[in-house]
Image (cartoon, grey):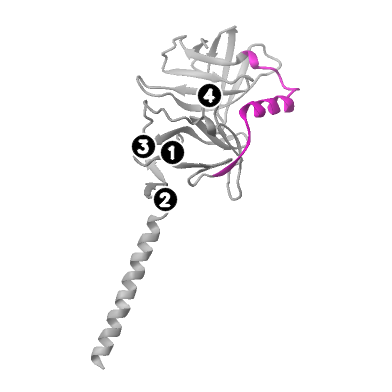
Amino acid sequence: MKNACKHLALCALTLILCLALAACGSDDSDDYADYGDDSTVPSTIDGFVKESYDSYDYSSFEGYYLPDSGTDFDYLIIDTDGSRWRIGNNDDLAASGYLQYDADYDCIYAYNEHDGVAYQFSADGGSVSIYSLGSFIYEMSLDELDAQAEDDNDSLTDLSYLAGIWYLDGELDADSYIYIDSSGGLWGLYERAPGAESTEVDGGFISAPTDVDDVYYAVSTTYQDVTYEFTLFDTDSIMWGGENDYYERLE
């Protein structure tokens, strides 16, 4: 009888250990995901670095996407060359960055400049997914999106004459430049360290007051309650922000 009790106790202890090990294994499944045939890759990577030799063709991902069921954000836009992306709710930019193929894991990551984390990216036909940020379904090309925006905003002031790339102090290799899209309504402020890729540090939309000539407001959708006033004082020169930084349009 005593041996039988010991046997039952040993079996119970073994069962408890197996359950504990199974629980530990399930925790890891949140951090790693199967990709491809037999590789296991991390769902997120901290300290991700964009490689200058990246030759992956991301252009097939270009477009405007709407959220799939269960996704918290209203849209995903992947730029024309497919290398940059942004996610948001209406005018509120929630995340943005670049796509990067990682040869070590044979996987594409979407690096988010807002939190410094790279999230596993996958595509399947007309849909894409970014780990923990959501899944999105292709809606239209960026050309179609621009045309629709023009149709919806015919009554708005035409700011297309502001379109272009404006460089700090009029230098092509400047560590800061401002990109204004073809409509003149959207802007992005980029900064870059010597020898490094440029990074979008702020962005949003542009409004023009009707009572003051050549004065504009660049409203940030990256940071709450932030707006930059800038002045166009000739065709290709602006004074930007409270420090009156000089930017010149060179492209």
| Mark 1 or mark 2, whichever is nearer to me | 2
Helix, strand or loop for disc 4: strand
| Mark 1 residue crowding within 10 angstroms, few (<14) / some (14–19) / many (20+) | many
| Mark 3 residue crowding within 10 angstroms, few (<14) / some (14–19) / many (20+) | few
Residue, x 43% and y 23% (percent of image)? 198
- Name the amino acid, label 3: Ala
Measure how far apart labels 3 and 4 are at the Cα level: 30 Å
Tags 1 and 3 touching, CB below 8 Å: no
| N-term mark: 3 or 2 | 2
| N-term mark: 4 or 1 | 1
Helix, strand or loop for disc 3: loop
Circle on res. 103: 3
Residue nearest the observer in this picture, 161 or 144: 144
Report whether 178 appears left or right of 137.
left
Tell me which segment is drawn in magenta: 135-161
Report whether 173 appears left or right of 78.
left
Task: Tell me which corner region of the image, top left, top right, bottom left or bottom right, holds residue 204.
Answer: top right
Report whether 122 appears left or right of 137.
left
Measure how far apart labels 3 and 2 are at the Cα level: 15 Å
Helix, strand or loop for disc 1: strand
Residue at mark 4? 188
181 w.r.t. 86: above or below: above
| Mark 2 residue crowding within 10 angstroms, few (<14) / some (14–19) / many (20+) | few
Residue at mark 1? 109
Residue, x 38% and y 42% (percent of image)? 45
Circle on res. 34: 2
**Where's residue 80, x and y in %?**
55, 26
| Mark 4 residue crowding within 10 angstroms, few (<14) / some (14–19) / many (20+) | many
- Name the amino acid, label 1: Tyr
- Name the amino acid, label 2: Asp
Looking at the image, which residue sits at the far top? 234
| Mark 1 or mark 3, whichever is nearer to me | 3
